Image (spheres, rainbow, N blue to C red):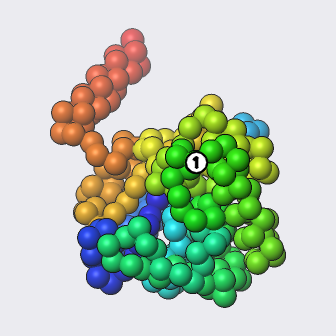
Amino acid sequence: MYHRIGRVAAEDSAVLPHQFNRQMELLTELGYQIIELVDLVSAMKNGKPLPIRSAVITFDDGFNETCNEACPTLKKHGFPATFFLISNLLGQCADWLAHRQRLVSLAGARLLVHEGFTVGSHSMTHCRLTELSDSAAWEEITYSKQRLEDGLGVAVRSFAYPFGYWSLKLRDLVASSGYQAACTTQSGFNGYQSDVFALRRIDIDGSYSLSKFKRSLTFGENRMSVASQLLYYSRRFLRSVQIGSVRCN
């Protein structure tokens, strides 16, 4: 999960373009298969096998600069991605940031679709859905889908909870609104038994060194303590010793 790719790393920790490019290069070097979000969901629902190192790339908010900087790099590597857009704020500024960044316009969103990228919904106004009434939350979820579909002429199948605020009730509202999946901001891996309306993601920001990025891919966590890493590798070592003993016998 990315938010901002920008040439100036401001207070909101934008990932610099060269950082992003190197991260995409690393995915290729490590043998990751970058797949569409809808393909992941289909595999989860149908038990369809996927490559062991499968990953999905997503962007929340749809900042104009992010689209301009990220898309050429994604296309260079042949990577698909999903951009979660805020239907009622297209072309406006993000007032929840100290550095007011402009969001992609409707024309820019159409260009994303034309370039082969996927668009999902990030609500109508980027509000905290957990603070709304059921009816207001339903409108944010449902009408954002309708407005994006009307403006872009494509099906909008996925949703991302603004600020990561979600609940089981909101999960059910998303499911009943015609979406096929929804993304949270909780870190971790997604398996075949995971809830497709509560998908986990790793939040990548400008503080990520390449080694930290690689660790997050390994552990599925945004922040992994040294103690946790030692425990992880100790278990792997003991497991390999046990397997070796069995083979010797």
Q: Position of residue 136 (x, y in %)?
A: 66, 51
Judged left or right of residue 108, residue 208 is: left
Give residue 160's quadrant in the image: bottom right
Q: Position of residue 92 (x, y in %)?
A: 53, 81
In the rendered view, would you say 146 is above or below 244? below
The residue drawn where x is 21% and y is 39% is 225
Of 125 and 239, which appears nearest the observer?
125
Judged left or right of residue 236, residue 1 is: right
In the rendered view, would you say 244 is above or below 7? above
Instruction: Determine crowd level at label 1: few under 14, some 14-19, many 20+ residues with C-alpha closer than 10 A.
Output: few
Q: Looking at the image, which residue sits at the far left?
A: 226
Of 43 and 51, which appears nearest the observer?
43
As helix, strand or loop, the secondary structure at mark 1 comes to loop
Q: How many marks?
A: 1
> Looking at the picture, which amino acid does disc 1 mark?
Leu
Residue 113 seen by the camera: yes
The residue drawn where x is 46% and y is 54% is 163
Residue 84 seen by the camera: no
Of 76 and 119, which appears nearest the observer?
119
> The C terminus is located in which quarter?
top left
Q: Position of residue 190 (x, y in %)?
A: 54, 41
Judged left or right of residue 207, residue 200 is: right
Q: Which residue is mark 1?
A: 132
In the rendered view, would you say 167 is above or below 67? above
Q: Looking at the image, which residue sits at the far bottom?
A: 107
The residue drawn where x is 76% and y is 77% is 152
Q: Position of residue 146 (x, y in %)?
A: 78, 65
The residue drawn where x is 29% and y is 32% is 232
Give residue 114's quadrant in the image: bottom right
